Amino acid sequence: MAEEELPGVLILDIGGTHGVLENLAALLKKHFRLITMKEFLQNKKEMSKKIQSIFVFECRPTIDRELLESLPNLKVIGNSGVGVNHLDLKMISSFGVKVTNTPHAVADPTADIGMALMLASARRLVEGCQIAVSPDTKYFAVDWLGVEVTRATLGIIGMGSIGYRVAQRARAFDMRILYHNRNRRRKEEEEAVGAHYCEKMEDLLQQSDFVMLVVNLTPETHKLIGKKELGLMKPTATLINISRGAVIDQDALVEALQNKVIRAAALDVTYPEPLPRDHPLLKLNNIIITPHIGTATVQAIRMMAEEAITNMLAVLNGQPIPNHGRRRATWAFGK
Ligand SMILES: O=C(O)C(=O)CO
């Protein structure tokens, strides 16, 4: 098909260097007439008619009412990533526009980051790296002892496809696995990873050496972990967050870490992102923070784009969005 005949896709905020932009653009161009924000703004009248889809790459773009009002033929927003809390779904849906996400592509790399944070925090890897390169060469490992992950208890809050993959990995470390979820997993799924269901999140918090947050950010999970929940955790426990920053009450976390209510925290997500440089979390030594890199791999970026493209094409062609089974379903919001 000639480029002019392809459905137009507006791309928002594909940042980055090292050919990321070019690679993703090449993938999109196989199926779409690619329109950058700059092109759109320069020639709004013509471009607005062509745009049938928007590809969202970073989870901080602004899709506001004004933009939607200017795109009469928009049918679908393909979010590259699983979390869609940065999009106003209700407002978007009121325009008859669907939002799709990419749960398949994100599951493994995000679970890997959860494990990496757990291990790095347990073994004080970041401090170790700093000590190894510091001018002082007279250091003793006994001065910064870590704790072991092997055979410890891991509590997973949110047992969707990412949480389940964390459990699969944790099993290889002989961990005792507890989980709390809105819906209990099937018995065979629990048995396959040796996970025990905690109906009450409090039970999981009290028993776990490591608590990993893997829930979606919704009004129900906003500040799910606050002063009370931190107080229920063991003083030797570590809190890991790979979901969204706002799932934790950050002021309560600062206090808990300062007062050693819990041993440590390891966060891939915060609010805001990035944190202001004078934020109290950045002044603590019992925390490690990574800059939201759950899916920052060469493979994931590509797979997310492919999944988003498949989803967007399905919507544009009036077909159901591909669904690979009950637990791994790609979902779409909107009418
Ligand atoms: O896919 C997402 O929404 C992520 O934030 C991965 O870290």
Image (spheres, rainbow, N blue to C red):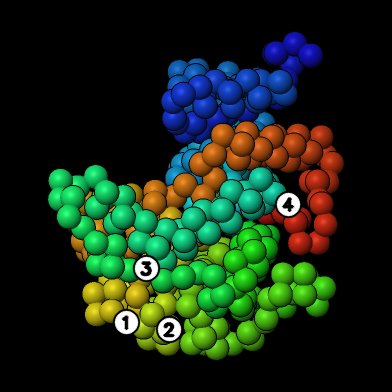
Name the residue type under label 1.
Val
What residue lies at 53% left-to-right and 59% top-to-bottom?
A: 115
Q: CA distance from mark 3 to mark 1?
A: 17 Å
Q: Earlier in the sequence, mark 4 or mark 2?
A: 2
Q: CA distance from mark 4 to mark 3?
A: 39 Å
User: Which residue has dot 4 on it?
Assistant: 330
Name the residue type under label 2.
Met
Q: Quadrant of residue 126?
A: bottom left
Circle 1 sits in a helix, a strand or a loop, which is it?
loop
Q: Earlier in the sequence, mark 2 or mark 1?
A: 2
Q: Are marks 2 and 1 in contact (CB under 8 Å)?
A: yes
Front disc: 4 or 1: 1
Q: Which residue occupies the foreground of this view, 170 or 291?
A: 170
Picture disc at residue 146: 3
Is residue 7 shown to the viewer in this render? Answer: yes
> Assess mark 1: CB under 8 A from ligand 1?
no
Crowdedness of circle 1 by 10 Å Cα count: few (<14), some, many (20+)? some
Q: Which residue occupies the foreground of this view, 165 or 73?
A: 165
